[in-house]
Amino acid sequence: MNTAKIEEGRELVRQAEKCMKTSLLKWRPEYDLAADYYTKAATAFRIGKSYDQSKDSLLKAVDCYKHNTAWFHAARCYEQIILICKETNNLLQIEEYANKAANLYQQHGSPEAAAAALDKAAKVVEQKHPDMALRFYQHALEVSMIEDSSRSAIEYCSKVSRILVKLRMYDQAADALRREIGLNQQCESYGQIGRLAVVLVMVQLARGDQVAAEKAFKEWGNCCDAREVQTLEMLLQAYDDEDPDTAMRALSSPFIKHMDVEYALLAREVPLPQGMQAASKADVIKNATASYTSPNADVSQSHGGAGDAANEEDEEGGLC
């Protein structure tokens, strides 16, 4: 710990507290000056690696900014707290502060800043807490849709789709992909729609719904390039024929392997069709045992032999 920086932070806190005091001649605290001292103190504490004091100073700065309705600066303080949570590995606390920052940015009239704050928070937690990152991206998508920013909405919708696939939440992933396709239609990004059609077919197959997979191809296949069409036709025909080998070849296509990591891994998760294999004949061991003969067959044969002998005798007697 850097004791000099910590002492500097404490001195700045004392200055902030003086600004907060009132007197006969000063009826209202000087919130703007106090907030400035608290934020500087937070920086000093952070450099000195006294993270608890840094976080406490930022929270006090937030209160000061709120008194002055300085929503943007208050939101920035919450973003600084998120960075402290990252450094101290308190990732579960990030969700509270990220949502507060986003709400204050929106209150200030800066939806782009709100979505960006949620996006940054999602990147911090995505590796260890993808479910939390999913909520951040969904929130950012909602903010972008309110702002009617199609480009930003496509970006966040894409991130939602990828995380849902990563978490194997295929029902929701199918809905998200259809929504992403719709947003790309608005921007006339037909090449991207073709790639998403491939992913949607794989997601439907992962759900075990071959009919929905074929429907997705019929609906969006006209946006696919020749390579994508050939692969999807091979894949769906393999499911019709219950041919796992052909399905595996289709899912191992080079362009699928070079898709986003989540989608490349999805291709390995898709269950292959189960082909009908003929039962193998049992091997016959020669001379292992005598062939089975029905006892009734022996009796009938013996009766038949006796009858024939009698007939022969009658014929001989008749001749005599």
Image (tube, rainbow, N blue to C red):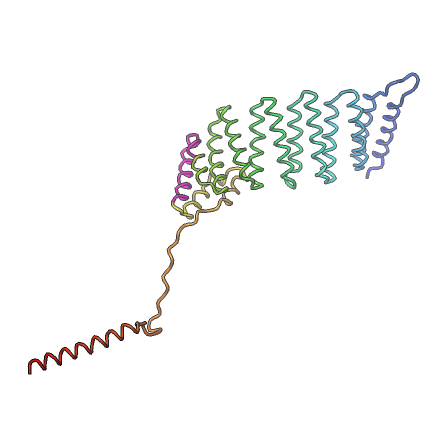
Judge from the rendering whether residue 197 lies leftward or rightward of residue 162; answer left or right.
left
Residue 231 part of the magenta segment: yes
Seen at 36% across and 61% down, the residue is 281
Please tell me whether residue 14 is drawn above or below residue 209 in the rendered image: above
Eyeballing the image, is 72 above or below 131? above
Residue 132 drawn at (x, y percent): 65, 37
Q: In which quarter of the image is residue 54?
A: top right
Estimate the x, y position of residue 200 in percent, counting from the top left.
49, 36
In this view, which residue lies farthest toward the right?
Answer: 24
**Is residue 146 shown left or right of residue 52?**
left
Q: Residue at x 75, y 28 (%)?
A: 77
Q: In this view, does 180 lie to the left or right of 33?
A: left
Q: Which residue lies furthest to the left in this view?
A: 320
Quarter of the image that includes the C terminus: bottom left
Of 110 and 264, which appears nearest the observer?
Answer: 110
Q: Is residue 304 above or below residue 274?
A: below
Which residue occupies the extreme bottom position in the image?
Answer: 320
- What is the x, y in percent for residue 69? 76, 20
Residue 216 in the image: state x and y as whole percent: 45, 34
If the image is split into quadrants, where does the N terminus sit?
Answer: top right
Q: Nearer the viewer, residue 167 or 303?
A: 303
Left or right: residue 296 compared with residue 37: left
Residue 222 within the magenta-colored segment of the rendering: yes
Is residue 75 shown above or below 253? above
Query: Which residue is drawn at the image coordinates 48% and 39% (left, top)?
Result: 204
Magenta stretch: dominant secondary structure = helix
Residue at x 66% of width, y 25% of height: 113
Q: In which quarter of the image is residue 81?
A: top right
Magenta-tinted stretch: 216-240
